[in-house]
Amino acid sequence: MSKLKEKTLNTKSNLDFRPTVTNNIEKPGTEPKRNVFEIDDLNLWYGSTQALYEVNMNIPENQVTAIIGPSGCGKSTYLKALNRMVEMVPIVKTSGTIKYNNQNIYKDKISQEYLRTKVGMVFQKPNPFPKSVYDNVAYGPRVHGIKKKAILDQIVEKSLKDAAIWDEVKDRLNQNAYGLSGGQQQRVCIARALAVEPDVILMDEPTSALDPISTLKVEELVQELKEKYSIVIVTHNMQQAARVSDRTAFFLNGELIEYDDTNKLFQNPSDKRTEDYITGRFG
């Protein structure tokens, strides 16, 4: 047993239960999904405080993977580790491996700029730039050297259509994005992420600041987007996880407790802690 595992077992009593991690379950007769991410023995510290403990998890392409768990359990930290945004905190250190398309994102020669282009992020609160709707969506392509207006026009229109908001903003492209509703702003932010043609979209509580109607639109959008993208969504809303995801991971105190097909996890969880959480006994 490694020193890390010895230390963890001695300091975290709930590790008497071992996590249930079932990777790449497929229905009979279907081909297994390719993994866009493969995470092995991921540990993460903020200074001397450990936030993630030996996470092992595969994330399949063209599916929605939900991350659930109580506040402070490591959900957002884990999400930000997938595109190295967690490195924006200087005291962070990690061990283990995160492979994106078979490349170790912390050791192989993958630039942060490239990784964050291919693995986009949508945040909890809508965060459009104080620019026009058009300039928000065109920002990424311009950074990547696209200057011709005709090409930018095509990218902006396609991205807004893919984000299911084109019809609502096509006559307001030159207006400040701050003038849109919260739900519209969030979908513009999703369009902004799509404009640089990512493979994966990370969503950190993307509907927590939205009204029910806007939440429904974003959830419907997530279902449409998985045809082209792999999506990982952190949510406190277990009903939302059940509605939108193919697979669900339950985190508690920095550990991955259970990871399985969403229907299986919610209807017949393998770990009592998962059952206690989804039935409202804590959290």
Image (cartoon, rainbow, N blue to C red):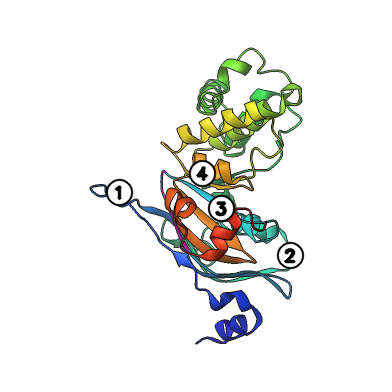
Task: Name the front one of labels 4 and 2.
Answer: 4
- Indicate the secondary structure of the residue bearing disc 4: helix
Pointer 2: what residue? Answer: 90
Q: Are marks 3 and 4 in contact (CB under 8 Å)?
A: no
Q: Are marks 3 and 1 in contact (CB under 8 Å)?
A: no
Q: Where is 147 relative to 46, above or below? A: above
Mark-to-mark CA distance, 2 and 3: 25 Å
Mark-to-mark CA distance, 1 and 2: 43 Å
Q: Position of residue 212 (x, y in %)?
A: 65, 30
Task: Name the front one of labels 1 and 2.
Answer: 1
Q: Residues within 10 Å of mark 2 (few under 14, many from 20)?
A: few
Mark-to-mark CA distance, 4 and 1: 18 Å
Of labels 3 and 1, earlier in sequence is 1
Pointer 4: what residue? Answer: 242
- Indicate the secondary structure of the residue bearing disc 2: loop
Highlighted range, magenta: 57-62
Q: Amino acid at mark 2?
A: Pro
Q: Quadrant of residue 173?
A: top right
Q: Are marks 1 and 2 in contact (CB under 8 Å)?
A: no
Task: Name the front one of labels 2 and 3.
Answer: 3
Of labels 3 and 4, earlier in sequence is 3
Q: Amino acid at mark 4?
A: Ala
Label annotation for residue 56: none
Q: Residues within 10 Å of mark 4 (few under 14, many from 20)?
A: some
Pointer 1: what residue? Answer: 27
